[in-house]
Image (spheres, helix red, strand yellow):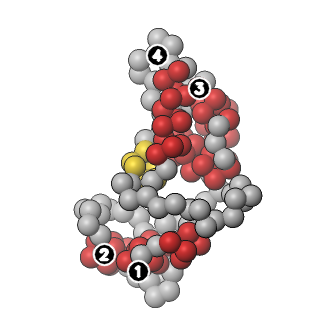
Amino acid sequence: MREIVQLIGTDTEKERTKIMMGDHPYAHLDRRIAVQKFQELSDWQVPIHWQLPIKVIDPQPAITVAKIDGKLPPVADRVAEGLSDINHSVFMYGWVTGLTTISSNRTIDKQIETTIENNRGTDEDLEGPMVWICDTARSLAGKEKDRKA
């Protein structure tokens, strides 16, 4: 994420990323102050209880446990099959934890939705991961094509 923001982010996006990730000079800020500073740079209302800085985690254990414990619907395997490593970790982790994934990747969002709808059967309560699509999208054409993660 940091690499992408450095390549294509605006100055404001770069600053918000530093706050969000707890990078210098925001590394030791109180959570409430970090949220306030993030809000000052944001057009949208920022939740006052947002836990900053964001922690980078290994999503795979939570995804594996959710599958073993049956916390994901059977269609989750079909959804996962069509995702790259990075999209798998992001969208599947959000799904198993009930967290909303913020993305500008409408293509993956639509792919997940289509897979779920095509495999819904009679389950009208079946829900996929919660995704909030950011309207601001920019091409990552400058990124290496052969990187999977």
User: Image point 51% across, 13% down: which residue?
Assistant: 121
Residue linked to disc 4? 123
Marked residue nearer the N-terminal end (3 or 4): 3
Q: Residue 47, how many percent across, how many down?
A: 29, 60
* Residue 111 drawn at (x, y percent): 53, 36
Q: Earlier in the sequence, mark 4 or mark 2?
A: 2
Labelled pair 2, 1 in contact (Cβ < 8 Å): no
Q: Secondary structure at mark 2?
A: loop
Q: Please tell me whether residue 91 is drawn above or below residue 13 in the rendered image.
A: above
Per the model, the C-alpha gap separating discs 1 and 3 is: 40 Å
The amino acid marked with disc number 2 is Leu
The kind of residue tagged 1 is Asp
Whether 65 is drawn above or below 33: the answer is above
* Residue with the mark numbered 2: 41
Residue labelled with disc 1: 11
Q: Secondary structure at mark 3?
A: helix
| First-in-chain label (1 vs 4) | 1
Mark yes or no: residue 65 visible. no
Disc 4 residue type (three-letter): Asp
The numbered dot on residue 89 is none
For this view, does 38 lie left or right of residue 79? left
Distance in Å between CA atoms under marks 1 and 4? 46 Å
Q: Give the alpha-carbon distance from disc 3 to disc 4, as whole Å.
A: 11 Å
Residue 68 image position (x, y, % from top left) = 67, 32
